Image (cartoon, rainbow, N blue to C red):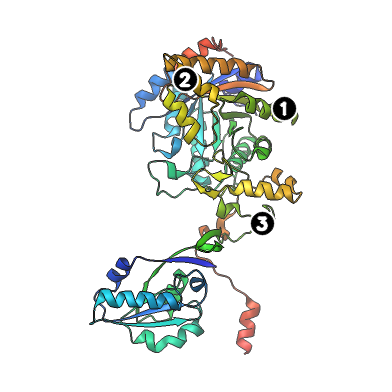
Amino acid sequence: MPSSSNLERVLADGRFAVTAELGPPKGTNLGVVERKAETLRQCTDAINITDNQTAIVRMSSLACCIRLSALGLDPVMQMTCRDRNRLALQSDVLGAVASGVRNFLCLSGDHQQFGNHPGAKGVFDLDSIQLIQTLAGMRDSRKFQGGDEFSGEAPIFVGAAANPFADPQGYRVVRLAKKVRAGAGFIQTQAVFDLEIFSAWMAQVTARGLHERTAILAGIVPLKSVGMARYMRDYVSGVIVPDAILTRMENAADPKVEGVAIAAELIDAIREIPGVRGVHIMAVGWEDIVPVIAERAGLLPRPLI
Amino acid sequence: MIIAQQKPLEEIREMVAGHRRVLVLGCGTCVTVCFAGGEKEVGLLATSLRAVLGKDVQVAEATVQRQCEWEFLDQVRGAVEAADAVVSLGCGVGVQGVAERYPGTLILPGLNTSFLGLTEAPGIWAERCLACGDCVLDLTGGICPIARCAKSLLNGPCGGSQDGHCEISPDNPCAWVLIHDRLTALGRADLLEEIIPARDWRTSHAGGPRRVTRPDLQAARREE
């Protein structure tokens, strides 16, 4: 059963989709979320709300998604397996669906060691593929993972992440295939900077026909500074920043302008790669730049379906 | 085997403070092999304790074959009951074994029990099993993703696997890289395509403290 998600409708209509990421505040002010969301309203089809991203405690994805839904936006609720067991995850899905949330992104979650509670116990009751199966089961048979039926419908659009740049290379597409088989209808990838590796990965994806069974949205991270580019290259696991991009950032008179230009060029190139169905722009902490990038990349206006 | 490490001397000294007759009790099995609580370590700890506790405190030494079996614990009844406090250099099982056998004596832990593992190289021990109670090693090329993946992922590597190691530490090989490489080498890459469904964690500690019963052995015991 299709959800009433705007993202799913845009993809079903064959449009090149645009989603963006919004990081909730480390505090109690929901107004910050509303302002960021309004910035993204006209230039995106759906807005991802991160779930304690990098294992740092922030306002819950659930609360932010409910608010966005009330504002007539289409949130993508990120859910990590790190912080909640299958009871809590499914309970949150029921509450989110009841409040109008339709898109869910199933993630393993960054290891708790990286965040502001490094001594926390990671849950990992389910892994991300088992979470996809759980949500697809809730949608298709109105049953919990444990087998019990629940009342009402769960018309949800289930998504997952994929990282074309992590190891082992030989397993990356296999793992994507498992996610698709588990029920993932859309995929948002890790940040793409290296088009060569990404194209090679997409060739494997299309060779297996996976692009026809799921919608692949390529991840875009706009670089704000040389320091950020170096940090992404050196410290973010599973991200590859080629020397050519680093050199451009180093030589730029205005790194922010260069970062926007690089992002727009990457989007242009990615649109030409067979099988890619959209982009997912991750400018956490720099959400204001998303409309600029979308404009530069010719992604506006967004379709009304 | 069970791998353990000795607690800092200062912590042990604080635990035994105020007691006049202290017994340091070693264990001759796992913790002897990993150089944490065997006869040699008992001697070293007892010597250190005598030095820091002074002449007024008697520090005795004993080591049993295994602290997790009543028959061995019964062999040191005299030494245990003569002590005000026993510092067990057994693993957590050993400490509790001694405490259960000698309910009237204070038993203190001299070790921190680390994990179930093996000796990778002299001086290096590494975890291999979480005793989750439902072995999947047939599906994963003999490499356990529950014990060796930092997120216990059952269906492949997360996005943090790079250059063959785990995102949490360059010293920690990515379990799923090892599994991928080994299954591929064994001609069983097909297993990588299988989805392992959500686990029933009741076989692990999630189901509460576990107990194994073997009626056949119980019957044999009664006939003896």
Tell me the kind of residue under disc 1: Thr
**Labelled pair 3, 2 in contact (Cβ < 8 Å):** no
Residue drawn at the location 59% of the way across and 45% of the way down: A145
Residue drawn at the location 54% of the way across and 25% of the way down: A243
Residue drawn at the location 26% of the way across and 78% of the way down: B19
In front of the other: A3 or A48: A48
Q: Looking at the rendered structure, which numbered label has been put on residue A206?
A: 1
Q: Return the disc, 1 or 2, that comes first in the chain's sequence.
A: 1
**Labelled pair 1, 2 in contact (Cβ < 8 Å):** no
Q: Residue A214 location, x and y as percent?
A: 66, 28
Quickly name the residue at label 2.
Answer: A249
Marks 1/2: CA–CA distance = 32 Å
Judged by depth in the image, the label closer to the viewer, 1 or 2, is 2
For mark 1, name the chain: A
Tell which residue pokes out farthest to the right in this image. Answer: B187
Tell me the kind of residue under disc 2: Met
Tell me the kind of residue under disc 3: Gly
State the quadrant of the N terminus of chain A: top right
In front of the other: A1 or B29: B29
Judged by depth in the image, the label closer to the viewer, 1 or 3, is 3
State the quadrant of the C terminus of chain A: top right
